[in-house]
Image (tube, rainbow, N blue to C red):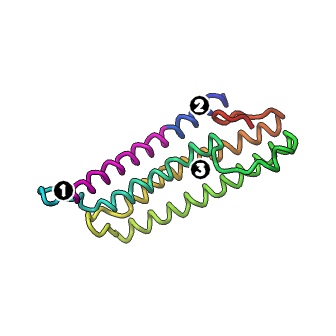
Amino acid sequence: MLDHIDKGMRKLAAALAILGGLALIAVMLSTVASVTGRALIPLGLSPIRGDFELVELGTGFAVFAFLPWVQINRQHASVEILTMHLSARTNRLIDLVADILMAMIALLLAWKHWQGTLDKLAYGETTFIIQYPVWWAYASGLVGAIGFVIVSLWCVLLSFRALLSGRDQAHGEVVH
């Protein structure tokens, strides 16, 4: 049963990461098109109107979309100079504490992001140039933030199970 849930969590994290990657590709292509349009103004082309607003939207979504993938694969930056000399049980305990702290951070980020989305929706604020509602950008990032919470809570459960069982857990390509 837990293996089935784990596969689902990994699929969720991978799907969000792929969507984030596609958003970055779209940002890159729109930037290239806009810069090319600026360079070729004498030939009748022009930059994309509101290009920097689109970059902000796509990049914000991508950052939050990558967080679940990084968390489930334990790819956050870490310093192992001390932990490599500790026992496996101590390292499993450290993993559990780190996962609990990360889940708390994920919950805080999602909660504040939710509040920000509701504020932007209530005020009806739009971007300056292309006039799309700002809450759209917040809501797109909220998708990744919620995925981050779900995956972070799952990682807490995995770390707790590893601590109780005394068996290291696999995270992506790395075994802890």
Residues packed near mark 2 inside 10 Å, few (<14), some (14 to 19) or many (20 plus) = few
Mark 1 or 2 closer to N-term?
2
Q: Is residue 13 left or right of residue 48?
A: right
Q: Please state the horizontal and vertical placement of residue 80, each as a whole percent of the image.
A: 76, 48
Q: Closer to the camera, 130 or 45?
A: 45
Q: Residue at x 70, y 33 (%)?
A: 170
Q: Amino acid at mark 1?
A: Leu
Q: Residue at x 44, y 63 (%)?
A: 117
Q: Please state the horizontal and vertical placement of residue 146, each as a whole percent of the image.
A: 53, 50
Range of the magenta residues? 15-40
Q: Quadrant of residue 166?
A: top right
Was residue 31 drawn as part of the magenta stretch in this picture? yes
Mark 1 sits on what residue? 40
Q: Residue at x 58, y 37 (%)?
A: 9
Q: Amino acid at mark 3?
A: Val
The image quadrant where one finds the N terminus is: top right
Tell us which disc is closer to us: 3 or 1.
1
Mark 3 or 1 closer to N-term?
1
User: Could you say whether the residue bearing mark 1 is in a helix, strand or loop?
Assistant: loop
Mark 3 sits on what residue? 149
* 125, above or below 40, in the image: below
Residues packed near mark 1 inside 10 Å, few (<14), some (14 to 19) or many (20 plus) = few
Q: Quadrant of residue 69?
A: top right
The answer for how far apart the CA atoms under marks 3 and 1 are is 45 Å
User: Could you say whether the residue bearing mark 3 is in a helix, strand or loop?
Assistant: helix
The image quadrant where one finds the C terminus is: top right
User: Could you say whether the residue bearing mark 2 is in a helix, strand or loop?
Assistant: helix
Q: Please state the horizontal and vertical placement of residue 49, each as a whole percent of the image.
A: 24, 61
Residues packed near mark 3 inside 10 Å, few (<14), some (14 to 19) or many (20 plus) = many
Mark 2 sits on what residue? 7
